[in-house]
Amino acid sequence: MEILDKIIELLPLLLPIVIIDFGFKIYAFIDILKEDRRVRWDNKIIWIAISIVINFGWIFYFLFGRDE
């Protein structure tokens, strides 16, 4: 029960971070799938995998993946 108490104690701190991360993952996914969006190395599947699978992978996409 000690571990459960720690999780409940940290939940108010972690929940906003998880929600923000999820929101940016959705935004990056939609941005990658746009027809007129060019991504670095012309491989949208790789950038979808990076931005969705890796924790905070959307940061890599927005910093390095967008080819404008």
Image (cartoon, rainbow, N blue to C red):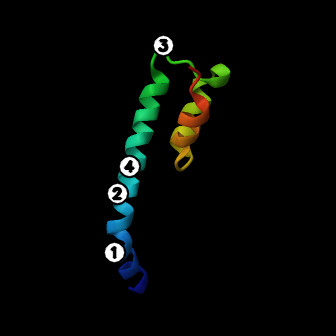
Provide the secondary structure element on which disc 2 rests: helix
Q: For the residue marked with disc 4, what is the amino acid?
A: Ile
Could you tell whether 4 is left or right of 59 in the image?
left
* Numbered circle sitting on residue 8: 1
Picture coordinates of residue 12, whole percent (x, y): 32, 67
Q: Which residue is mark 3?
A: 36
Mark found first going from the N terminus, 3 or 1: 1
Residue 49 in view: no
* Numbered circle sitting on residue 16: 2
Residue 46 in view: yes
Q: CA gap, disc 4 to disc 1?
A: 19 Å
Picture coordinates of residue 54, whole percent (x, y): 57, 47
Provide the secondary structure element on which disc 3 rests: loop
Image position of 56 with respect to 13: above or below: above
Q: For the residue marked with disc 3, what is the amino acid?
A: Asp
Pointers 2 and 4 in contact (C-beta within 8 Å): yes
Mark found first going from the N terminus, 4 or 1: 1
Q: CA gap, disc 2 to disc 3?
A: 32 Å
Q: CA gap, disc 2 to disc 4?
A: 6 Å
Q: CA gap, disc 2 to disc 1?
A: 14 Å
Mark found first going from the N terminus, 2 or 3: 2
Picture coordinates of residue 16, whole percent (x, y): 34, 57
Q: Which residue is mark 4?
A: 20
